[in-house]
Image (tube, grey):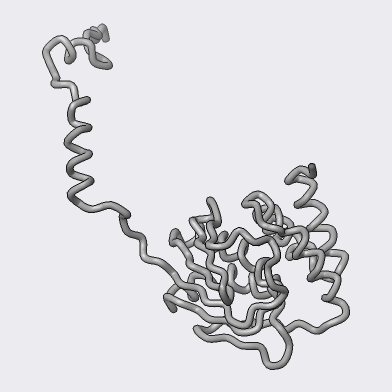
Amino acid sequence: MKSLSEIETTSKRASRGVGFSWGIAEEVGKCVRLLELFGLPGIKNLNRYYQKKNKENFDDIRLINKKNTSNKNSLCPISLGIRFLDQIRKIENYNKCLFKNVAYPLLLLPFLSRSSEIIGKKLLVVLDRYEFLLNFNINISSNSLEKEFPSKAKIVKIFFLDNKDSFTDYDWKSLYKLSENTFVEETDSLKKGAAGAGLNDND
């Protein structure tokens, strides 16, 4: 079994080998490592994308808007991911974002996952019929266990989710009341044994 370090290094070198700068190649290495760590086929999708990259043209969007589409060719998931990371502070103000015609969309996910950590918000990502919940770059959960993800997504929708508790105020207060059973009432003996107590100032 290949280590995560081997996965990251080989992905980085392969990215440089197909023409990306070393800076972008490093980002790709980190992202493919994340996919494999989360149990998603990062190496497989990266390899298949790179096999096509030098044979087909893929578009790049420099400025990301609320709705985005390619003029003719599919969007490059790596260039798109880099742009998304760079512009995340502006993009989060849209609350939701849409892209049309994205090649190998699974490769976009780790860039979005890292963006989730930067802004401190969960992201719901819909790739055609696949749904992914990105949790602050800690994990990626999905409604599908399939490993054969599409080589192209007609529509990619990204929703920025508001941070809120998953429990009611009643449940919180009830649980907190139970926690009060661990509180120790302060007594004179505790005060004497507290940090700094009983020390004489000899100066």
Residue 85 versus residue 100: which sits nearer the camera?
Answer: 100
Q: Position of residue 129 (x, y in %)?
A: 56, 74
Q: How many marks?
A: 0
Residue 98 versus residue 80: which sits nearer the camera?
Answer: 98
Residue 149 versus residue 30: which sits nearer the camera?
Answer: 149
Q: 69 above or below 200?
A: below
Q: Position of residue 151 (x, y in %)?
A: 72, 74
The residue at 45%/77% (across/down) is: 96
Residue that lies at the very extreme toward the left in this rendered image: 188
Q: 108 above or below 101?
A: above
Which image quadrant: the C terminus? top left
The residue at 83%/76% (across/down) is: 53
Residue that lies at the very extreme toward the bottom in this rendered image: 71
Q: Position of residue 157 (x, y in %)?
A: 52, 77
Which image quadrant: the N terminus? top right
The residue at 77%/64% (across/down) is: 46
In-image side of 162 versus 55 (left or right): left
In-image side of 181 versus 15 (left or right): left
Residue 174 versus residue 24: which sits nearer the camera?
Answer: 174
Q: 99 above or below 38?
A: below
The residue at 77%/50% (across/down) is: 7
Q: Position of residue 48 (x, y in %)?
A: 81, 68
Picture quadrant where residue 201 is located: top left
In-image side of 3 versus 18 (left or right): left
Picture quadrant where residue 41 is located: bottom right
Q: 176 above or below 94?
A: above
